[in-house]
Image: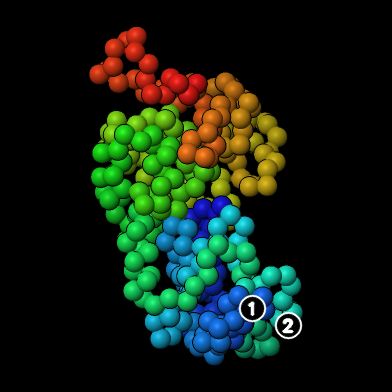
Amino acid sequence: MPEGHTLRRLADDLSAAFAGRTVAASSPQGRFAAEARQLDGATLVGADSAGKHLFVELEGDRFVHVHLGLYGSFAVHADVPVVPPPIGQVRLRLVADRGAGSSAYADLRGATRCDLVGRGAVAETLARLGPDPLRPDADPELAWERVRRSPRPVGDLLMDQAVLAGVGNVYRAEVLFRQRLHPLRPGRTLRRGQFRAVWDDLVGLMAEGVRLGRIDTVRPEHTPEAMGRPARRDDHGGEVYVYRRAGQPCLVCGRAVRTDVLAGRNLFWCARCQPRFRSRALGSGEPTPEDTHG
């Protein structure tokens, strides 16, 4: 599933291509036909994202609320001389004249959600989400308050969009590695400074993801060039420490990367770089909650 940086980059691309312009809206597939007719000929105000949600605003306080889900895509093409016929199952197509013989178009396919909503519905969605590290108005204290009271593993909490919006499996795995935190450590055992380090790291990593259009998380000393190793080959792109590297040597210590399943999603971590948390409240012979997960 696309993570928050993908939606933020998409919002920026849509705004750059269409903001302030009259758009022709259509639904070649037909599933959004009635709504597209209402939007056809309207001015597109801009686009914004929150977590994994995208909001395309058009005049009259109307918003197209999109959630790409696992397989959705919203391809933006700016400055094309000719707009080609739609290919495949295009739920929503936006087209705008950019002048000087140039046009822009965007095709939405395969999204889990595509709804025409008002400003109130947008506000309701935002109220259900935790703070997004990519939004300038985000308040990390809201996430901290939930994390510090929860017995749930921090690896689970980071994926809960009501706790912290926009983080998916890649950023979850990578930020926990970079901060040397075991994914099964209970949230309530984190210190404020540890949580803030996670938040600040996510802010930087996800902003870099917006800039590059991919997820890169390794520090300069661990790049392929610095280590003399082959570049990663994976359809997710980017250089990472542990995500989808189960059984491969850790780039820092050399121990094999581990994997397990938590709440239906795969975990990846290094047992040496991310040691288990052992509470002082537990006796030395009593297993921690993480001991049962290898």
Q: Tag 2: residue type? A: Val
What coloring was used for the rendering? rainbow
The residue tagged 2 is 82
- Residue drawn at x 55%, y 62% is 112
19 w.r.t. 49: above or below: below
The residue tagged 1 is 30
Q: Residues within 10 Å of mark 2 (few under 14, many from 20)?
A: few
Residue 210 visible at all: no
**What number of labels is visible?**
2
- Residue drawn at x 34%, y 66% is 124
Q: Position of residue 60 (x, y in %)?
A: 40, 86
- Residue drawn at x 48%, y 35% is 262
- Residue drawn at x 30%, y 21% is 279
Q: Position of residue 39 (x, y in %)?
A: 52, 85
134 w.r.t. 264: above or below: below
Left or right of 64, for residue 213: right
Mark 2 and mark 1: Cα distance apart in space: 23 Å
Q: Tag 1: residue type? A: Gly
Kindly check if marks 2 and 1 are in contact, taking CB atoms under 8 A apart as contact. no
